């Protein structure tokens, strides 16, 4: 393996507090004890040279401020971001030799992940690694890995859109963007306007925190090791049931699925109103639509789902989620202080460690004109699969994500089994399916009794 040093320079430099999006993801990294590396490999066009790959990296580093940002940590205050105007970074050049280049690329993915998990130092290193896998000196694959603090899914899409514009222009830089990079975001957030916004959001959070049940889960139980588990459910029946419900209610799939989760959560934990923190990408806000950065934060959503039909629960969620989105752009440090303060006022610890993230990038929200029949929905139940495995890192107490799965429905559920047992994890995923199918077959049906598994 050789190395090619790439020199870069770009507009902007300076030091500021972290943006709210950066603080949000950094908090998750600290709780889960991982830098959350995001790797991928891709074949490069035939005839690509190592120098062209180096130029590609130079363009990324020069154009996107977040890639030339490091963190500065302090023992007596929050970390700060340091944006550099220039620097250098190395491209690893790996000769495949007699090996399959695809296998070598996968090995480099594994090496990058290991590096970010065990060697990466955000105060010293750039938050990106790049390797070129070559065959007889000719590049075949490009392997890129970034720390999650660089971008979320929509930030990565903004970066890819920028690269497509560059390619369409024959390598010329695209027109300047009005999108705010993290340094500018942080400066706005510290401005009078940013502070007024944050105070308004904190008032709304305070209202919900004073009303919500203190617990998200039953009392914790030591269930030994491994403590943190991952469950995956793939259900064609849920996908079909969502189509039926959408056709009947005219609701979007995102609202239907969120309602399924909140109803299932209440059934399995025995706690109502159902409360969860909902991922909001915040790119509907000024200056953030095309920002190559992390803007996703988690709004607080509380909905009473007891004793009503699914359609009524859906209507309540649809009304409540507007406020959740509106109040999902905030200073996470101030929110943490608020949660602790109101907990003291109430005389009990407030638990908001329950997360929901709809990660689909292509929501199936086209009008449904010919919904599946009840027989088709019921028949699809036999194709459901459930699998689970231990996590090699910590998880949140509960983190449920809806994932891309063309032609089906896929969710992943991570949990700390001290708060949600493996049996309860399965029950929660299955409850989403049961409620979806029941609501598709009979609009008047109630989601069912509270189970309250431990």
Image (cartoon, rainbow, N blue to C red):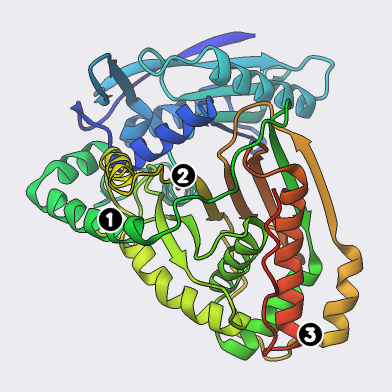
Counting every numbered tag in the picture gives: 3
Quarter occupied by residue 310: bottom right
To which residue does mark 1 refer? 206
Tell which of 198 and 191 is nearer to you.
Answer: 198
Q: Position of residue 14 (x, y in %)?
A: 18, 26
Residue 443, visible in the rendered structure: yes
Quarter occupied by residue 136: top right
Q: Is residue 129 above or below residue 231?
A: above
Label 3 sits on a secondary structure element that is loop
Left or right, 84 with reference to 168: left
Q: Is residue 19 above or below residue 408?
A: above
Residues at marks 1 and 2 touching, judged by CB atoms closer than 8 Å: no
Mark 2 surroundings: few (<14), some (14-19) or many (≥20) residues within 10 A? many
Q: Position of residue 253 (x, y in %)?
A: 59, 73
To which residue does mark 2 refer? 152
Residue 149, visible in the rendered structure: no
User: Mark 3 or mark 2: which is in front?
Assistant: 3
Left or right, 192 with reference to 182: left
Q: Upstream in the sequence, badge 3 or badge 2?
A: 2
> At 34% from the left edge and 44% from the top edge, which residue is drawn?
347
To which residue does mark 3 refer? 372
Left or right, 331 with reference to 47: left
User: Mark 1 or mark 2: which is in front?
Assistant: 1
């Amino acid at each position: 393996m050789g190395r090619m040093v790439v020199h870069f320079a770009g507009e902007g430099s300076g030091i500021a507090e972290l943006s709210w999006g950066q603080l949000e993801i950094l908090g998750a990294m600290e709780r889960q004890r991982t830098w959350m590396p995001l790797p991928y490999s891709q074949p490069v066009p035939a005839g690509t040279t190592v120098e062209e790959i180096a130029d590609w990296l130079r363009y990324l580093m020069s154009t996107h401020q977040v890639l030339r940002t490091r963190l500065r940590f302090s023992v007596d205050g929050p970390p700060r971001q340091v944006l550099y105007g220039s620097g250098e970074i190395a491209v690893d050049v790996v000769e495949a030799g007699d090996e399959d280049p695809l296998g070598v690329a996968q090995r480099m993915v594994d090496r990058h992940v290991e590096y970010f998990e065990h060697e990466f130092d955000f105060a010293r290193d750039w938050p990106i690694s790049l390797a070129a896998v070559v065959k007889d000196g000719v590049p075949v694959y490009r392997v890129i890995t970034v720390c999650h603090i660089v971008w979320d899914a929509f930030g990565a899409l903004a970066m890819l859109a920028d690269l497509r514009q560059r390619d369409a222009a024959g390598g010329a830089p695209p027109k300047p963007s009005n999108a705010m990079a993290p340094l500018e975001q942080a400066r706005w957030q510290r401005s009078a306007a940013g502070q007024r916004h944050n105070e308004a959001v904190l008032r709304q959070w305070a209202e919900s925190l004073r009303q919500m049940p203190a617990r998200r889960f039953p009392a914790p139980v030591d269930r030994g090791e491994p403590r943190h588990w991952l469950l995956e459910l793939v259900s064609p029946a849920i996908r079909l049931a969502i189509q039926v419900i959408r056709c009947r209610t005219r609701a979007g799939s995102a609202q239907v699925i969120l309602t399924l989760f909140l109803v299932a959560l209440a059934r399995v934990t025995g706690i109502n109103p159902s409360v969860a923190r909902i991922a909001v990408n915040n790119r509907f806000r000024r200056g953030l639509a095309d920002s190559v950065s992390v803007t996703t934060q988690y709004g607080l959503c509380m909905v009473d789902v007891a004793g009503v039909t699914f359609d009524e629960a859906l209507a309540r969620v649809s009304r409540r989620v507007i406020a959740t989105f509106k109040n999902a752009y905030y200073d996470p440090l101030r929110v943490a202080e608020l949660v602790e303060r109101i907990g003291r006022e109430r005389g009990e610890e407030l638990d908001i460690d329950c997360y929901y993230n709809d990660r689909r990038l292509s929501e199936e929200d086209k009008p449904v004109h010919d919904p599946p029949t009840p027989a088709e929905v019921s028949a699809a139940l036999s194709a459901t699969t459930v699998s689970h495995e231990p996590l090699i890192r910590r998880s949140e107490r509960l983190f449920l994500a809806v994932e891309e799965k063309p032609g089906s429905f896929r969710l992943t559920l991570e949990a700390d089994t001290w708060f949600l047992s493996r049996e309860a994890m399965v029950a929660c995923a299955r409850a989403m399916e049961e409620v979806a199918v029941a609501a598709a077959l009979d609009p008047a049906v109630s989601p069912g009794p509270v189970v309250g598994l431990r």
